[in-house]
Amino acid sequence: MRRRLSLLVASTTCLVLIAFLVPLALLIRQVTEDRAIGRANDVLQTIVPQIGTSDPASLALTVQGLPLPVSVFPPDGPALGAAAERTPAVRLAQANGRSFTVDTVAGREIVVPVLSGGGTYVLRTVVPAGQLTAGVTRSWLVLAGLGLALVVLGLAVADRLARAIVAPIADLSAVSHRLARAIVAPIADLSAVSHRLARAELTARAGPSGPPEVREVALALNHLAGRIQELLREEREQVADLSHRLRTPLTALRLEAEALRDEDEAARVSAAADSIERAVTAVIRQARRRGGDRAAGADATAVVADRVAFWAVLAEDTDREVRRELPAAPLPVALPADDLAAALDALLGNVFAHTPDGTALAVSLVPRPGGGAVLTVSDSGPGFPAEALRRGASGTGSTGLGLDIARRAAESGGGSLRVRAAAGGGAEVRLELAGARPVSPG
């Protein structure tokens, strides 16, 4: 703002000075010319009374002592005084008897006709160009210096005035910036804390600072975060209580299995009870896992081989052909073993639950380019309905959670789930699992 005010004053001062000094400079030049011509006319007027009263010798002597070169042209004969030729101006003046001035290369030519009894005499002189502009350049320099001094003085005064005007505004701007920082910083802190909470960093807390309203929002956000922590802790503990609630029914189931006379049947029921206990334990372990911490990855080859062997017994009882394609080497993935086993159990359980007995199924596990694995479960049954991927949606009276469990397990390990029709009819579920560091045996 100071700069703009200074520029405004400078431009205004320059315009005023131009409007004043340019006419004054032209006037000085004109006055100088008029003064030089006036002096020349005065010199010529001193000779006029002697025309016709003095003889030519006296007149020539008088003319030679003048400060300007003056020539007197009689009606006939040579010029008296300064040697000069009859110029067109001299002849014109003798012809019409009028005085006038003419600009020439040498300067300003002045001719004055004088009537006498013997005819018309013409007095001629030339004012040099140097005398016409004598002192003009110096006067112009003085005017330019005066104008420059006035511009500098105007800028100095304008700067002082602008500083006096801008200083309070600058103070107000600084105060507004401090107020803005005092308000924006706590709001930015609240935003950062809310984003951290959204990323499951439940220990994030906002510092109560800033205006009262912002402090109140910060305290409310901290209270909300604390309440979320309490609710999650209670939920984890409630899930953990399942182990105690299910332990007694599982113990009774094992006793019932031991009481069976058929040893094979007893072993089968005991294995089922052990499987249920492992599943419950995995759920409890996952519920008590702290936010952001993940269990180590698993060997997908070992997990898939174990679960396929488990379901192969049921497949044999229901006359189902199980085709398996598993790699010979370990295949590490980022998904924990419990989660991978739960996802595969959900997919295989869907096949047994939603396809008729005797329907063939296939399980394929191949390495994925760039690391990880691709697990494919397909069957030759009727396929899935369009809404099967929605959580809780089922067209066969089930819970509708199987595919959603598999999808969430895959996404938690950096992978994805896709469902499509199999090449020979039926459904095909494709789990893409991200890679992990190889898991050491045992």
Image (cartoon, rainbow, N blue to C red):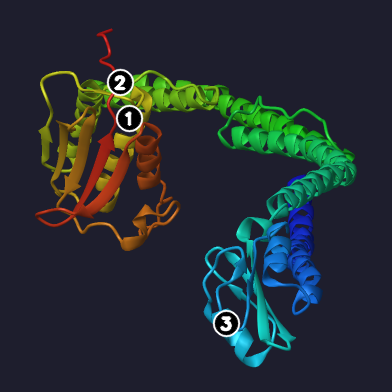
Regarding mark 1 in the picture, which secondary structure is present there? helix
Q: Nearer the viewer, residue 9 or 200?
A: 9
Q: Which mark is residue 298?
A: 2
- Dots 1, 2 in contact, CB < 8 A: yes
Residues under numbered marks 3 and 1 in contact, where contact means CB atoms less than 8 Å apart? no
> Eyeballing the image, is 423 above or below 320?
below
| Disc 1 packing (10 Å; few <14; some 14–19; many ≥20) | many
Closer to the observer: label 3 or label 1? 3
Please, what is the three-letter code of the amino acid marked with disc 1? Leu
Q: Earlier in the sequence, mark 3 or mark 2?
A: 3
Amino acid type, mark 3: Asp
**What's the residue at 59%, 25% (across, down)?**
241
Q: Could you say where residue 108 lies in the image, as x and y percent from the top left?
A: 62, 68
Q: Secondary structure at mark 3?
A: loop
Q: Horizontal and vertical percent for residue 290?
A: 55, 22
Whether residue 245 sits left or right of residue 159 in the image: it is left
The CA distance from mark 3 to mark 2 is: 138 Å
The residue at which mark 3 appears reads as: 76
Assess whether mark 2 and mark 3 are in contact (beta carbons under 8 angstroms): no
Q: Which dot marks residue 340?
A: 1
Give the quarter of the image for residue 164: top right
What residue appears at the point 76 percent right and 73 percent down from the top-left corner? 54
The amino acid type, in three-letter code, at marker 2 is Ala
